[in-house]
Structure formats: C-alpha cells, structure tokens
C-alpha cells in the first residue's frame, strides 16, 4: 500500500514559515520599545496592576487546584452519564468568547443578578473588586487545568492503583505515592496553562472589573489613552511574568520524560 509522504523541503519550509508567523510579532515588539523609558513606565504604571494580577491569579490557582484536581480525576475514572455530561458542559466556557463570559458573569454575579444579590447580604461585591477578577480568571482558566488533569489521570494504568490497594496501602496513600507522581507531568502542564490563561485574562475581566486594574486591563487603558508606545512596555512586562512558568514546565517535561 502506498503511503503519502511529505517532501522534507516542503515540511521544513512550512515549519519555518509557521515559526516566523508566530515569533516575528514578538521581535517587532522588542524593536519598537523605548528601552530608555521602560523601567520608569513599569514603576509608574505597572507596579500596582502587576500586584493585582499576581494576587488574583494566586487565589484563582489555589481554587483551581483544590476543586479542579478531583474533578479531573472523576472525569478520567467516572463511567456514568453524569460525568460525560459534565465533561461536555466544561467545553462551553472553554470555547466561549471571553467577552461573552464577562457578560454572563455580570448577569449572574452583578448587583442585580441572582448570586450578586446574595453576595450583598455578606457585604461582598463581584463587580470592580478582586473577587470579580478572581471569578473571571477562574471561569477562563479552570477548564484548561481540568482537561489537562483528566488527560494525566487517564494515562495512568489502573493496574498500578489495584496493585497498591491489594498490598494494603490505603486509598489516600495510593493517591499520594502512586497516582500523583505518575500524573505530575500532566498536572504541571495544566497548572502552567491555567496560570498563563488567568494572568492574561482580559475579555471577561474588563467587563466585570475595570477596577482594580490588572496588567491586561492596564495595557488596554494605556493603549486607549496614550497610544501604542505607552502600552508596549506593559505588554512586555506581562509577557515576562506570564511566560517563564509555562516555558519552564515544558522544558522540565522534555528533559525528564523524553
């Protein structure tokens, strides 16, 4: 039987073109930055937004790990119709435009929404607060971690779990000593993806929390009020904060598991 083969030269050309398409805009950003003023812009306009971005992202990631890890586990091992339905429902926020997510959150958590009205009784507000930012980040980032966790747990042969339990190891110890070490690479990838998605969240965040300004929102404000030269330094700051963890995770997985 004949097999379709792609000529090496064509594959190499396609690969370089794709790489150039993805990398050249970043190179253009570096070339158009005013390096003399970049530190002053970071100090004047980036310090507070960076703090709010890191603080809200840390909270959202803690919640993601706490609830997303068991959910990923049950999605990987659950056989009932309920878990299949939940898996399909999780695709909705994953595929939904971020701006629409923001509108839905305002409608539900806003001052006139069902949950928003309930929050007011506890002195809380999900509009223009850190809580609002965290909710928006969670809605955008949780599915990335959950599906990565599901994939990580699905790749583990259930025989390891059965053998551990048959040797008298408790379910909790089996999870800690067998399951989690085997799933660690996939969980780290999911965590890194959720981190990058949360700290870079813009569409949903700007609808529910124009204040306090996170870095993505501050970039938009600088672009609207002062133009591209003022927005570029903040964009670089966001890149420098968001990229190291995902890149380090990918490199770690390549070094230890390839």
Image (cartoon, helix red, strand yellow):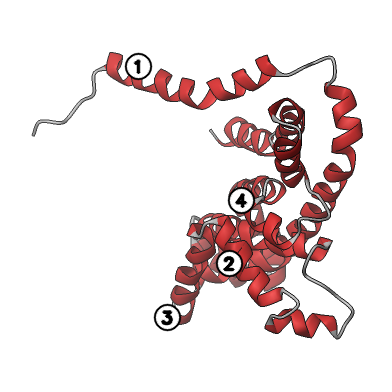
Nearer the N terminus, badge 4 or badge 3?
3
Percent position of residue 70, x then y: 64, 69
Query: In the rendered image, which quarter contains the N terminus?
Result: top left
Nearer the N terminus, badge 2 or badge 3?
2
Nearer the N terminus, badge 1 or badge 3?
1
Depth-wise, is mark 2 or mark 3 nearer the camera? 3
Nearer the N terminus, badge 1 or badge 2?
1
Q: Secondary structure at mark 2?
A: helix
Nearer the N terminus, badge 1 or badge 4?
1
Q: Secondary structure at mark 1?
A: helix
Determine which residue is flagged by label 2.
Answer: 73
Distance Cα–Cα, label 1 vs label 4: 31 Å
Percent position of residue 250, x then y: 61, 36
Q: Is residue 232 above or below residue 245?
A: above
- Which residue is painted at 89% across and 39% down in the image? 47
Distance Cα–Cα, label 1 vs label 2: 41 Å
Percent position of residue 172, x then y: 71, 70
212 or 146, which is in the foreground?
212
Q: Which residue reaches farthest front?
A: 225
Answer yes or no: do the residues labelled 2 and 3 have beta carbons within 8 Å? Answer: no
Q: Can residue 56 be seen from the camera position used here?
A: yes
Determine which residue is flagged by label 3.
Answer: 81
Determine which residue is flagged by label 4.
Answer: 190
Q: Relative to residue 117, is residue 87 drawn left or right?
A: left
Distance Cα–Cα, label 4 vs label 3: 25 Å
Q: Which mark is residue 169?
A: none
Determine which residue is flagged by label 1.
Answer: 13
Distance Cα–Cα, label 4 vs label 2: 13 Å
Percent position of residue 31, x then y: 66, 14
């Amino acid at each position: 039987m004949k097999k379709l083969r792609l000529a090496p030269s064509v594959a190499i050309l396609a690969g370089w073109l794709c790489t150039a398409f993805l990398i050249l805009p970043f190179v253009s950003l570096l070339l158009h930055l005013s390096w003399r003023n970049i530190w002053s812009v970071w100090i004047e306009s980036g310090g507070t937004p960076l703090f709010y971005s890191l603080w809200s992202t840390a909270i959202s990631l803690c919640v993601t790990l706490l609830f997303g890890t068991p959910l990923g586990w049950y999605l990987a091992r659950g056989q009932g119709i309920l878990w299949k339905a939940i898996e399909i429902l999780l695709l909705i926020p994953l595929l939904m435009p971020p701006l629409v997510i923001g509108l839905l959150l305002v409608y539900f958590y806003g001052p006139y929404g069902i949950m928003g009205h309930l929050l007011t009784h506890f002195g809380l507000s999900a509009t223009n607060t850190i809580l609002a930012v965290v909710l928006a980040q969670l809605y955008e980032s949780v599915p990335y971690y959950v599906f990565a966790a599901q994939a990580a747990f699905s790749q583990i042969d259930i025989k390891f779990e059965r053998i551990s339990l048959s040797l008298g190891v408790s379910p909790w110890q089996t999870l800690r000593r067998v399951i989690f070490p085997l799933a660690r690479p996939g969980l780290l990838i999911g965590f890194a993806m959720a981190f990058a998605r949360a700290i870079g969240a813009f569409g949903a965040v700007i609808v529910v929390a124009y204040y306090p300004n996170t870095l993505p929102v501050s970039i938009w404000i600088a672009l609207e009020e002062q133009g591209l030269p003022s927005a570029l330094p903040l964009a670089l700051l966001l890149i420098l904060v968001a990229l190291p963890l995902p890149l380090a995770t990918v490199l770690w997985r390549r070094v230890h598991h390839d």
